[in-house]
Amino acid sequence: MRISHALRLGIGAVAIAIAASTTGCGGGNDAGTGGSQAKDGKLTIGIKFDQPGLSIRDANGSFRGYDVEVAKYVAGKLGVRPADITFKEAPSAQRETMIMNGEVDFVVGTYSITEGRKEKVDFAGPYFVAGQALLVRMTNTDITGVESLNGNRKVCSVKGSTPVQNIKDNYAKDIQLLELDTYSKCVDQLRSGAVDAVTTDDIILAGYAGLAPGELKLVGPTFSVEKYGIGLKKGDRDTREKINNAIEEMVADGSWQRAFETTIGPLSGSTLTPPVVDRY
Ligand code: GLU
């Protein structure tokens, strides 16, 4: 499944998506089947706090979005009720460390499975596949894809992310790269005119475009494949298997599709094929 440049930009309607989703959690409460990490019936899950449609913290402190739905569903299958989940902010650059030092039990946060990260943590999934794209101001006409960033364009992305690495490794010949902690800070820089583009996964950018209809747009095509996994402690095979099972059940019972459609889906303008879980 590729969302890629099929993302329909500027679908303004979008506030909707972001509002969404109290549905679809239905994770079930198979108490007693939880992995070692859920033995006390509680989980601390690392997520993003500022990615509209995917994982956002409201003013009243509640969490919504596609990643939140995935996290709640998986927790349910580990025997943990939504009320017993503590969500902790896991910025891109801190995810491996937070998992390794036990600050979080796992991370559900637009977290690409990579060989480098697999040296430090394990991944269940993938549960979603995205691709790197660009977000620019609606008035911009000369940035049409990653190649057109050359010419000293100012581009913002997030420290410790795969998009930043991809730009550095493959494209940064003549680009001014600004690395911040979160994508929302990059989007602020884009809106103020301080940078010309923000780069990360298309699905993340679609959420920001949706918040600023008529002001920001995605440009494609995508130039990477980002398989989102659920990161957990390296070597905890038992929990990883349980999370993999939960992801498969989420797809099979329709919750996966419903979670997407009631959150970020309306922004993406695409239909989805669930990825196949990789039980490496
Ligand atoms: N999926 C990419 C990554 O894991 C970009 C999104 C993010 O930084 O959360 O690095």
Image (cartoon, rainbow, N blue to C red):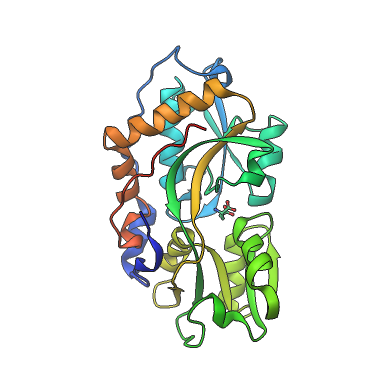
Q: Residue furthest top?
A: 32
In front here: 111 or 15?
111
Residue 260: image x %, image y %? 34, 48
In front here: 69 or 141?
141
Residue 154: image x %, image y %? 65, 78
Splitting the image into 4 quarters, where does residue 38 fall?
top right
Which residue is found at the position 69% from the left and 70% from the top? 178
Q: Residue furthest front?
A: 280
83 lies left or right of 166: left
26 lies left or right of 62: left
Residue 145: image x %, image y %? 50, 77
Splitting the image into 4 quarters, where does residue 53 fall?
bottom left
Which residue is found at the position 46% from the left and 22% from the top? 78
89 lies left or right of 266: right
- Above or below — where is 148 with respect to 89? below
**Residue 65 at least partly seen:** no
- Above or below — where is 267 with respect to 66? below
Residue 92: image x %, image y %? 63, 51
Which residue is found at the position 39% from the left and 72% from the top? 213
**Residue 39 at least partly seen:** yes
107 lies left or right of 255: right
